[in-house]
Each structure stands twice: as structure tokens, then as C-alpha cells.
Image (spheres, rainbow, N blue to C red):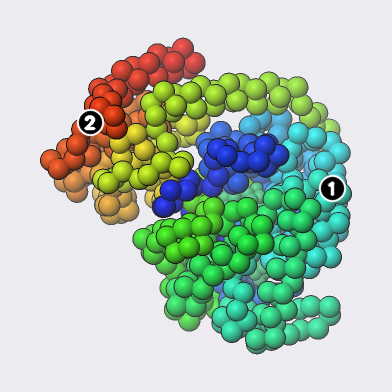
Amino acid sequence: MAPAGGCASTKGCGSSATGLDPEIAEKIANHPCYSQEAHQYYARMHVPVAPGCNIQCNYCNRKYDCSNESRPGVTSRLLSPEEALAKVKRVASEIKQMSVLGVAGPGEPLANAGRTLRTMELVARDCPDIKLCVSTNGLTLLDHVDRIEQLGIDHVTITINMTDPEIGARIYPWVLYRGKRHTGREASKILSDRQLAGLAALTERKILCKVNSVMIPGVNDDHLVEVSRTVRGMGAFLHNVMPLVSAPEHGTHYGLTGQRGPTPTELQALQDRCAGDDGAEMNMMRHCRQCRADAVGLLGEDRSEEFGPETYLNGEVTYDLAGRQQAHAAIERWRTDVRATREELRISADGIAKPARTVLIAVATKGGGVVNQHFGHAEEFWVYEAGENWARLVGTRSVARYCEGPSECDADESVLDKTVRLLSDCAAVLCGKIGNGPREALTAAGIDAVECYDLIDSAVAAQGARLAAATPSQSLTGPGGSPEPGQELAVARSMIASRLAAEV
Ligand code: CLF
Ligand code: SF4
């Protein structure tokens, strides 16, 4: 698929099912990219079946995977469609929460349409409960819309970095279209026209479309608000603005010419503008992890190394459909409980005005919607903005893993320092456990370290209420004279703890 990525205004991160057309709600219910809530429970896998490409992006080095959805500098082993099917069956039977198969590289999936669509055909035949997803640069999308619809590919991502060819000429040096190589403004005009025509054709067929955009400061950053408005007007469901990654060692044009990527603050500010502060009012994705073309597992985890060729090419793999259905039913029971708890706690960001005071809270989690990871084992933190009975995910931040075991828990100060800097704008970090050294470093930086084992939503809202309550000017009484949030949450938290104890 295409490049990397990661909320403000009153909209959620990715989409919640609230207020959605039931048909769309069903399509996104267990898609970890199209639903921020679903990404806590369901996994995706990519199969690298598409080697070639038909355009050149200035943020791509062909030695590596397509950067339109994966972090640059990663190389995947190419699979045939039949090998890909065998791998899908193996992974789906072992990681039963794997709900979506995507083709996102290592090149452009639709420049290799035969291999990509054959893979989808085989998986649709043998794995009927798996959703099919494709990412494309959009150049030849219009040629394949009928086949995409026939195969039941319900989710398509198009990487659209511009609708203005003048800007495009600074991103795309050339485009190969109908056997002819085009350069300059003409190349970007062809690409943009084809992308938008493909998007229109897909939305006309009610195929859910996500648009990925790479944010390139000084090139297309301001323009992406206009892109967001345009694609929303054409029926795109979701917009994923991702940061340019341009390390010189990746050998890309941008990397070699010193083009910088955005800071997390710049990225969030642009996402907020697209989400509504600037009138685009687009539904934004903020939990993208810029996956590899062979990614396996929950977003943010990479289990691809567990599934080498020896695990799926030696003998027939039986597809455990019944086992998968049981696992998904169990996940849905748990999700129903979590939603009920949110309603009891009156925690929401959907359609509710943001409180006057909010804080950022980082969470270490292994998934399942629970704060459950050791601080030192966290390779990424989920960052929430929270206030009284209000919480929303605003992004995820990756850190180097610095703790390999209890004895080394406080050892690598430099990585710890880096982690503290990464979270320096957060008021608190919630984690399953934390060593004394990291706790002291966080405290010295003004960040509370909170150990808990709780639902993320309730834990974040409780800490948001506590930290807001610490501000002298803030009222502690909820609307209509309701109980103080701290009291209300304390009662509800003990209830959640009982539920968790019963489930685990
Ligand atoms: Fe893969 Fe992309 Fe489908 Fe998701 S990834 S093809 S829509 S199943 Fe998701 Fe990964 Fe971000 Fe892509 S987190 S890079 S947005
Ligand atoms: Fe590279 Fe092609 Fe993907 Fe652009 S579309 S990032 S050139 S593989």
C-alpha cells in the first residue's frame, strides 16, 4: 500500500461506528485501519506479491518497499499468489484476530494487477471471512475497478499527495502511463486526474476508500487541507496524513537533498486542520503505523518473522474457519462490555464538546483495549487527549525498546532519556509496571508514572479528570450537578477491575 502515518476537533481517530450507515459500520467493524476502535482487537496481514511500479516518488528508493504505506528502508521477500495464499491460511489459523488481508507492495499493487488480483481471488475462495484490502498510487486504478468490485475488495487506499500538478512536479519526477514516460507538470496532471477518476468510480460502487497523503513540509503541507476537502467531497471515507520519512541512508531523493519530515506537533496540527478546524471536516486516521509490505499482527506489532516460508510451504494448511469464528465472537463480547463501560462512565469524544482543560496521557498497551504493558517493554505509546469524561486518541509514538528484562530495567539511560523527551508534552504515562529509574526520570520531567491494569478508556479518563482537577481554576462538578468525576470514576473503576478479574 502507500506511506506512513497517525486527532483533534471533535472527531475521533479513524472512525467510530456512531451515526454511521449500517452497511458502512459493518464494513469497518473489524478493519483495524478504518476503525480506530477495531485496531485494539483485530490484526491485519500484508502479502508482498507486487514487485514493480509505474511512477517515481521522491520519497522512494526502489531498493526498498513502496513508501506509500510502509516506512522507508524495509525490504520484503516476494511471494507468488499461491505462496501468499498458503501464508494467509497459516497466519489466519494461528492469529485468529487477523481479519484483513492487504496488498501494499513491495511495489505498486496495480502495476502488478495480475499477481495482486489473483492473490485476492484465491483468498476470497478459501478464506471467506477475511476482508480484502488494496493500496495503490491510483495511476491505473480506473482500469481495475470492475474486477475489484467483482472480487469483493471492499477497501481501497489511494495515495494522493496533491491535486495541483505544480506541487506534484516537486514530488513525482516521472510517471509511466500507457507505455510513455511523462515528466514535470504533465506527469502529475495525468496522475492526479487518474487518481480522482479512480476514486469517483470506487465511491460510486460504494467501495470504501481511504486516502493516504505523505506530509512533505514546504512542498504539500498547506495544500493537503485542500486535498482533504476534495477527496471528502468525492466520497472518500477516511484520510490518513502520514509524515515523510527521509533519512539520508535510505537513498531517496528527499533523503539525499535534505528535505525534512514534519514534527509530531506539525503532523497533528495538519490532521486537526483537515478534521475541521480549517473547514475540511474530514474523518482522519491517526493510528497508522506505516506497515511493512509483509506486516503480520496487530498494528504496531510485527510478527512477520514468526511466519517464514517453512511454516506455510511444507504441506497443506487447513483453514480453521470455525475456530476463527469463535475467537471473533469472544472479541465482540469483550468489545460490547468495553462499550457498555464507556457509556456507564459517560466517556466519549463523539459529538461532545471538548472540555476547557485537557491533558495528554501516554499509554503502554499490548492491545485488547487494556493498559497492560511494562513501560520498559513498550516500543510505542498511544497518546490520548483527555479531560472530564472525555478522551480521544491523538496518535501513536514509537520508541526504541530499552528494557530486555528486570535486571536491565534501568540500564540504558540514553534510550530512556529519548523516551522521556518523546513524551515530554504528556502529563502522565499509564503502564502495567515501571522500574524505579524510569519512574524517577519521568517524575523529574513532570510526567506522572501510573501503574494500572485497566481499560484504556476508563484509565485515561480517570487520569484526565484527576489532572484537570489539580488545576485550581477548574470546576469539579459535572453538568447538572452530577457527582464529582473522581468519585464517579472511582466507583466505576472498581467495577471494571472485577470484570477484568473475571475475564482474565
Ligand atoms: Fe494494509 Fe493499508 Fe489495508 Fe490497512 S495497512 S493495505 S488499509 S490492511 Fe493501515 Fe498500515 Fe497505516 Fe496502511 S496502519 S500503513 S493505513
Ligand atoms: Fe515507490 Fe512506486 Fe510506492 Fe511511489 S508508488 S513509493 S515510487 S513503489
The quadrant of the rendered image in which ligand 2 is seen is bottom right
Q: Position of residue 148 (x, y in %)?
A: 82, 53
Amino acid on which the number 2 mark rests in the picture:
Thr
Question: In this rendering, is residue 35 above or below 328?
Answer: below
Q: Position of residue 234 (x, y in %)?
A: 67, 62
Q: Position of residue 40 (x, y in %)?
A: 52, 36
The answer to which of 503 and 150 lies nearer the viewer is 150
Whether residues under marks 1 and 2 lie with C-beta atoms below 8 angstroms apart, the answer is no
**Mark 2 lies within 8 Å of ligand 1 (Cβ measured):** no
Check disc 1 and report the residue beneath it.
151
Q: Earlier in the sequence, mark 1 or mark 2?
A: 1
Residue at the spot x=25%, y=27% of the render? Answer: 481
Residue at the spot x=84%, y=65% of the render? Answer: 143
Mark 1 to mark 2 CA distance (whole Å): 54 Å
Task: Kindly tell me whether residue 167 is visible in this rendering.
Answer: yes
- Name the residue furthest left: 472
Q: Residues within 10 Å of mark 1 (few under 14, many from 20)?
A: some
Check disc 2 and report the residue beneath it.
477
Which quarter of the figure is the N terminus placed in? Answer: bottom right
Disc ID at residue 353: none
Q: Position of residue 122 (x, y in %)?
A: 85, 44
Question: In this rendering, is residue 193 above or below 126?
Answer: below
Residue at the spot x=80%, y=35% of the render? Answer: 128
Residue 237 placement, left or right of 254: right
Q: Residues within 10 Å of mark 2 (few under 14, many from 20)?
A: some
The answer to which of 499 and 452 lies nearer the viewer is 499
Q: Nearer the viewer, mark 1 or mark 2?
A: 2
Amino acid on which the number 1 mark rests in the picture:
Leu
Residue 206 placement, left or right of 428: right
Classify mark 2: helix, strand or loop: loop
